[in-house]
Amino acid sequence: MKPDIIPASPERIADLHLSLSEIQARVQQSSHSNATLVAVSKYKPAGDILACYEAGQRDFGENYVQELVDKAEQLPPDIRWHFIGTLQSNKAKILASIPNLHTIQTLTSAKAATSLNKALPIDRSAPLNILLQVNTSGEDSKSGLAPLTPTSQASESELVSLAKLIISSCPRLHFQGLMTIGSLTESLASDEKENQDFTTLKESRDTLKGILEKEKEAGKLDGRWGDEGGHLVLSMGMSSDFEAALKAGSDIVRVGTGIFGERQKKGEI
Ligand SMILES: *Cc1c(COP(=O)(O)O)cnc(C)c1O
């Protein structure tokens, strides 16, 4: 039996509604007003998520598999869950069992892609959307595939071969685009100058798009990708830099602290 949700206090609900509506308004006032706002709810109780849901928010992001499984069981079935944590292929099966998991934003391996494709139920209402995570800053602490530059041997890269594998051989997955976290330094400086990580992700997307379209025209690649218009989407930008990301062309922003407030650090809970 699923445990009941402990509702947030009336004060907490009022605070959440205020911060959520402020962030939503800032997205709507940006140059990319129809971008998707993912409310990142890791470590936050189900009652907080429900308060945002009741204010109309539907896209939520979680980093930990078990936490996501538990919350998805308790919370309304029309929530669109985004998995944004480190994805281990041995967790693919449990993620695939969540009926309203909408997108995995952090795929980086063929092994995880094939495990997911195999584990997803045939009668699922829609394919699972996939973004490939790119390590734009090159930091060891960040996971992700190497970015593409127009001059690199892009068509031989892991990023391109993984995108092609999903498009051509994983019918229960839908390849939608690219995601990055980026470095904190770039984020802090991005008021004054263009964030290099955002530029790198855009360049990778444009290069990838060119390669995929060429192969499709040549009859070497069969399948669809991107949004309804075939546009490969970008997920970049968090609380501190989501407006800069929207200006740079992001289609999905992931905001945690700006909506829910500070999180406890991992060791503290
Ligand atoms: C935690 C997290 C976020 C949200 O970060 P905030 O700075 O709290 O907005 C966004 N994306 C990823 C991948 C995260 O892990």
Image (spheres, rainbow, N blue to C red):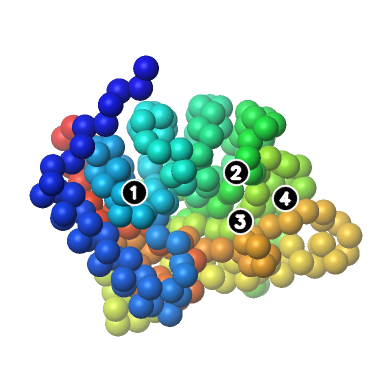
Q: Quick check: marks 3 and 2 in contact, CB under 8 Å?
A: no
Dot 2 crowding, Cα within 10 Å, few <14, some 14–19, many 20+: many
Q: Earlier in the sequence, mark 2 or mark 4?
A: 2
User: SS class of the residue under badge 1?
Assistant: helix
Direction from residue 80 to residue 185 in the image, left or right: left
Q: How far across and down, in percent of the image, does residue 10 sit? A: 13, 46
Answer with mark 3 or mark 2, whichever residue precedes in sequence: 2
The residue lying at 16 percent from left, 55 percent from top is 15
Which of the two residues, 8 or 184, is positioned nearer the viewer here?
Answer: 8
The image's mark for residue 53 is: 1
- Residue that label 4 marks: 167
Q: Is residue 135 left or right of residue 96?
A: left
Q: Nearer the viewer, residue 263 or 9?
A: 9
Quadrant position of the C terminus in the picture? top left
Of mark 2 and mark 1, the one earlier in the sequence is 1
Q: Which label is found at residue 176?
A: 3
The amino acid type found where label 2 is placed reads: Leu
Please give the count of numbered marks on the rendered protein. 4
Instruction: Kindly indicate whether the residue at mark 4 contacts the one at mark 1 (C-beta within 8 angstroms).
Output: no
As measured in the structure, the alpha-carbon distance from the residue carrying label 1 to the one carrying label 3 is: 25 Å
Residue projecting furthest to the left? 11
Q: Position of residue 172 (x, y in %)?
A: 68, 40
Most distant residue in the bottom direction: 192
Rendered image: mark on residue 128: 2
Query: For numbered disc 2, what is the local secondary structure?
Result: strand
Dot 4 falls on a residue whose secondary structure is helix
**How dense is the environment of label 4, judged by Cα within 10 Å: few (below 14), some, or many (20 and up)?**
many
Q: Say which element carries label 3.
A: strand
